[in-house]
Image: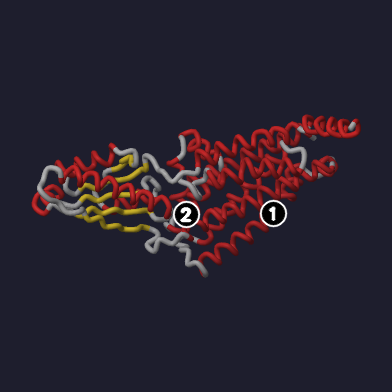
Amino acid sequence: MKELRMILKKEFIHIFRDRITLLLVLAMPVALVLLFGFTISTDIHNARIAVLDHSKDSQSQAFIQKLSSSNYFQIVSYPNTETEIDFQFKENNIKLAIVIPHNFESQLEKEHNTTIQVIDDVSDLNIASILNNYVRSVVLDFQNEYNESITHGEPFSITTKMEYNSNMESVYMFVPGIITLIMILVTALMSSITLAREKETGTMRMLFITPVKKIYVVIGKVIPYMIISFISTIVIIVISVFVFKMPLNGSIFFLLLLCIIFMLTAASFGMLISTISTTQLDAMMITMMGLFLPTVLLSGFLFPLNSMPMVFQVLANIFPAKWFILAIKDVMIKGSGFFDVWPYLTILFGMAVIFISISLKMLDKRN
């Protein structure tokens, strides 16, 4: 028993000395519970929508009030034409638009029936389906309230126009997310593990005393994984377009440039993780907790950000995956060009510069 106590004592000393691993082990259950508890939800609140009111009468205003008073929608625009609606969809200002027909009030009075058009952005199939159900719920409530004042009424008709994914293919939603995950796994994870391995074995210090600039040493370690990730991305895009009929409405060259910028951002994130890691295991765990899980849960890839508490919506902005998924969807599905997605590119490139600068400064301090 004495020998067992000595082994246990040694192991606990080792655990408490490795503060990074201890922190990860203790913090991981709490982080997972919070992330999964608050992010995995199919409810959407305050979705940004537009209302095109052709009628502008008392009943159409009552219907708009019914929409805005619900917790489902936030009316951010009142366009005058469907062309304006198309522009706002392309700018990602709205997720759904509702068109109220001409003579809305007179149709209700004479025929007790009317037709409301719903225009969906189906580039994200899950969100579009949920919002459609919300619209039908609000329309049904409005109809029931209106029918209380008349002797009989017929169900309102709702026509749906689906933008950017008329066949409602789920591949439109999954391909951008899969590309993002592949880039993070190959570029960020492998880069962080490779650099951490060099530190763990002591060879990084030997490399830094050679007559080679530190930036060249780091870049030389990272570029091979970026090339592998780039090849994997091209293969995924080819399979998606030719096998699953994923649209490629934008420029292929601009799409590849976007992927390269994101790979640079992911690689710089991997560099940053490696500088704060002492072992390969630390690098892998930090990458999975600090980058992979947020990419799955906080990027809008699987779960709508609007359904999350505000703190998580704000937190999602610091992870590059959110901006890349927004940009790649716009390029592939909506045919957007540089002037449409330049804010996303600027954010990604700015993140890469910041991560690389911090990483090099930390490497200088440690070596």
Q: Give the quarter of the figure containing the N terminus.
A: top right
Marked residue nearer the N-terminal end (1 or 2)? 1
Answer yes or no: is residue 99 visible: yes
Crowding at mark 2 (Cα within 10 Å: few <14, some 14-19, many 20+):
many
Where disc 1 sits, the SS reads: helix
Q: Residue at x 33, y 40 (%)?
A: 74
Q: Nearer the viewer, residue 187 or 28?
A: 28
Q: Which residue is mark 1?
A: 225
140 relative to 73 in the view: left or right = left
Q: Residue at x 46, y 34 (%)?
A: 310
| Above or below, comparing residue 155 to residue 35 in the picture | below
Q: Residue at x 24, y 48 (%)?
A: 140
Residue 127: x, y in percent? Answer: 41, 50
| Above or below, comparing residue 42 to residue 171 in the picture | above
Answer yes or no: is residue 210 visible: no
> Looking at this rendering, what residue extends furthest in the right direction?
3
186 relative to 88 in the view: left or right = right
Crowding at mark 1 (Cα within 10 Å: few <14, some 14-19, many 20+):
many
Q: Which residue is mark 2?
A: 329
Query: Across the whole image, how many numbered discs are drawn on residues?
Result: 2
Residue 346: x, y in percent? Answer: 52, 44
Q: Give the quarter of the figure containing the C terminus.
A: top right
> Looking at this rendering, what residue extends furthest in the bottom direction?
242
Where disc 2 sits, the SS reads: helix
How far apart are the two marked residues, 1 and 2, measured between alpha carbons? 24 Å
Residue 295: x, y in percent? Answer: 56, 46
Residue 157: x, y in percent? Answer: 22, 56
Given the image, on which type of amino acid does mark 1 rest?
A: Tyr
Q: Residue at x 76, y 34 (%)?
A: 364
Contact flag, marks 1 and 2 (Cβ < 8 Å)? no
Label placed on residue 330: none
